Amino acid sequence: MAKVKCKLVGEDGNAFAIIGRVSKALKRAGMKDQAKEYVEKAMASPSYDALLALTLEYVEDEAEASEE
């Protein structure tokens, strides 16, 4: 399955901002169930690094996508 593209680099490094941005991108792509699942897992992430790793399981950073 192709991942939804979401801008992560150069944006606010606040964990809640990232969660909101990714959730919104997933919902826009018609992936409402995945957005809910992502938010639940993201809110339980033990660290910022764990949150970023989880995020990249759900979306592709637009900056990385444009480099390919």
Image (cartoon, rainbow, N blue to C red):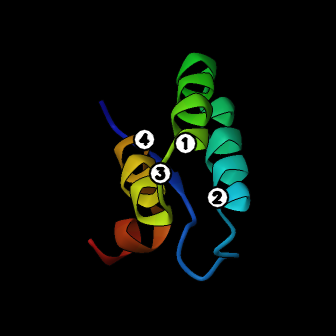
Q: Closer to the observer: label 1 or label 4?
A: 1
Q: Are marks 1 and 4 in contact (CB under 8 Å)?
A: no
**Does dot 1 land on a helix, a strand or a loop?**
helix
Q: Quadrant of the N terminus?
A: top left
- Compared to residue 10, the image places residue 53 above or below, namely above
Q: Nearer the viewer, residue 27 or 55?
A: 55
- Chain-order first, disc 2 or disc 3: 2
Mark drawn on residue 18:
2
**Label 4 SS:** helix
Neighbor class of circle 1 (other Cα within 10 Å; few <14, some 14-19, many 20+) is many
Q: Residue at x 47, y 51 (%)?
A: 46
> Decide: marks 4, 2 in contact (CB < 8 A)?
no
At mark 2, the secondary structure is helix
Residue that carries the numbered disc 3 in the rendered image: 46
Provide residue 60's location: percent of width, then percent of height.
41, 54
| Residue carrying label 1 | 42
Q: Note whether 46 is above or below 17 in the view shown.
A: above
Of the image marks 2 and 1, the number of the one nearer the N terminus: 2
Amino acid type shown at disc 2: Ile
Closer to the camera in the image, 19 or 6:
19
Tell me what residue is drawn at x 53 percent, y 77 percent.
Answer: 9
Q: Position of residue 40 (x, y in %)?
A: 59, 29
Q: Amino acid at mark 1?
A: Ala
Please tell me whether residue 36 is drawn above or below residue 21 in the rendered image.
above
Q: Nearer the viewer, residue 10 or 4?
A: 10
